[in-house]
Amino acid sequence: MVRKDTRELLLDAAVVVVNEIGFYRATMDAIVAQAEFSKGCLTHYFKTKNQCLLAVIDRYFERILTDAHTIYAELPEGPGRMLKAYLQSWVNWQEPPGPVQMMGMLEDPELRERVIEYRISHYELVLDGLVPEFVAQKTLLWCAGLWTTPFLARATPQEMSVFRKIMLDEMFAMIDASVADSAAG
């Protein structure tokens, strides 16, 4: 069994705290209480709450990309392959610690800027020249909508499973149809 390192445990605790009490009420003290570490341990890794939450955002988007590359390798060759892999990865990471519970962080300018930076780099990644740009934009906007969709925070695991299946099927069909249309046109 692999043991998580202290930094990862602190990030996990930060996600739990933000999920439970929200971004603004989350404190360094609440994070260390959740993690069952000393405050000195937390400040060794993160000097401020924002530094800790920036690390949560970084870890989240890094997981999405790692997962997307794994899914990409498993998908059949063809237009929209990276876009589909990214979309599937995004949906995979909607469970805690996922973006829905972290949406309060977007009100902080520094944290919002980090999310925007990731959005831009991810957008550039999914454009493969074979999928019309508007389809990539629409797909990424849908992913952004997942970030802020309050009903997902209240959905049961079964409801989430159904939602994922429907949305992925619809988005994949839209990608395939737009590729076919642009090839014909």
Image: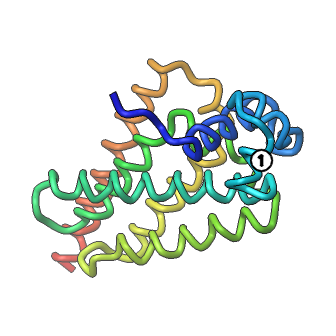
Question: Relative to residue 95, is residue 26 drawn left or right?
Answer: right
Colour scheme shown? rainbow
Indicate the amino acid at tag 1: Gly
Question: Residue 178's spot in the image, x, y percent?
Answer: 28, 66
Depth order, front residue of 179/88: 88
Question: Relative to residue 134, is residue 178 drawn left or right?
Answer: left
Depth order, front residue of 125/54: 54
Question: Residue 125's spot in the image, x, y percent?
Answer: 37, 73
Residue linked to disc 1: 104
| The N terminus: image quadrant | top left
Question: Residue 114's spot in the image, x, y percent?
Answer: 65, 68
Q: Residues within 10 Å of mark 1 (few under 14, many from 20)?
A: some
Q: Secondary structure at mark 1?
A: helix
| The C terminus: image quadrant | bottom left
Residue drawn where x is 48% and y is 75% of the image:
121
Question: Relative to residue 24, is residue 56 drawn left or right?
Answer: left
Q: Is residue 155 above or below residue 100?
A: above
Depth order, front residue of 118/149: 118
